[in-house]
């Protein structure tokens, strides 16, 4: 998936598809989008910055997909990258309780 996201046209289509998932707040949008993109089992292997032996989600093209989708969503379009990172960090923190 990460290799395919290098194609600008494919990337744009994925961002648009994920943006359509929407949400009523930043946390709600992140929760809905991440549940669509990544499985609970895979989310246990990642955190935002790769601490404690986990893989770094921040460097994946999927981070840019989520951030781009959040910027397209009318309820979250005014967020900045730091706010998106905080919401994603919170989402990864709850990964072990999901299933």
Image (spheres, grey):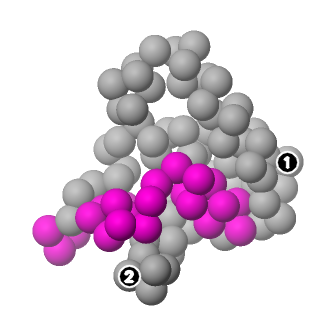
> What label does residue 74 carry, if any?
1
Crowd around label 1: few <14 · some 14–19 · many ≥20 (10 Å) = few
Residue 26 location in percent, x, y?
70, 64
33 w.r.t. 92: above or below: above
Residue 29 located within the stretch drawn in magenta: yes
In which image quadrant can residue 23 be found? Answer: bottom right
Please give the range of residues in magenta. 28-53
Element marked by disc 1: loop
| Front one among 47 and 71 | 47
Q: Which image quadrant for residue 33?
A: bottom right
Kindly identify the residue that appears in the image at 63 percent across and 34 percent down: 15
x 46%, y 46%: residue: 63
Residue 89: percent from left, percent from top: 45, 69
Find numbered disc 2 in the image and state the secondary structure of the residue it sits on: helix
**Dot 2, how many residues are within 10 Å of its Cα: few (below 14), some (14-19), or many (20+)?**
few
Q: Is residue 27 visible?
A: yes
Residue picked out by circle 2 = 96
- Residue 6: horizontal and vertical position, in percent? 40, 20
Q: Nearer the viewer, residue 13 or 27?
A: 13
Tell me where residue 24 sits by quadrant.
Answer: bottom right
The residue positioned farthest toward the bottom in the image shown: 97
């Amino acid at each position: 998936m990460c290799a395919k996201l290098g194609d600008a046209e494919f990337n744009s289509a994925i961002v648009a598809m994920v943006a359509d998932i929407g949400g009523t707040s930043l946390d709600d949008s992140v929760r809905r989008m991440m549940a669509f993109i990544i499985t609970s089992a895979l989310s246990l292997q990642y955190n935002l910055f790769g601490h404690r032996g986990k893989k770094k989600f921040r460097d994946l093209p999927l981070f840019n997909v989520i951030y781009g989708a959040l910027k397209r969503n009318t309820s979250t379009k005014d967020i900045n990258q730091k706010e998106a990172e905080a919401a994603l960090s919170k989402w990864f923190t709850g990964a072990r309780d999901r299933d």
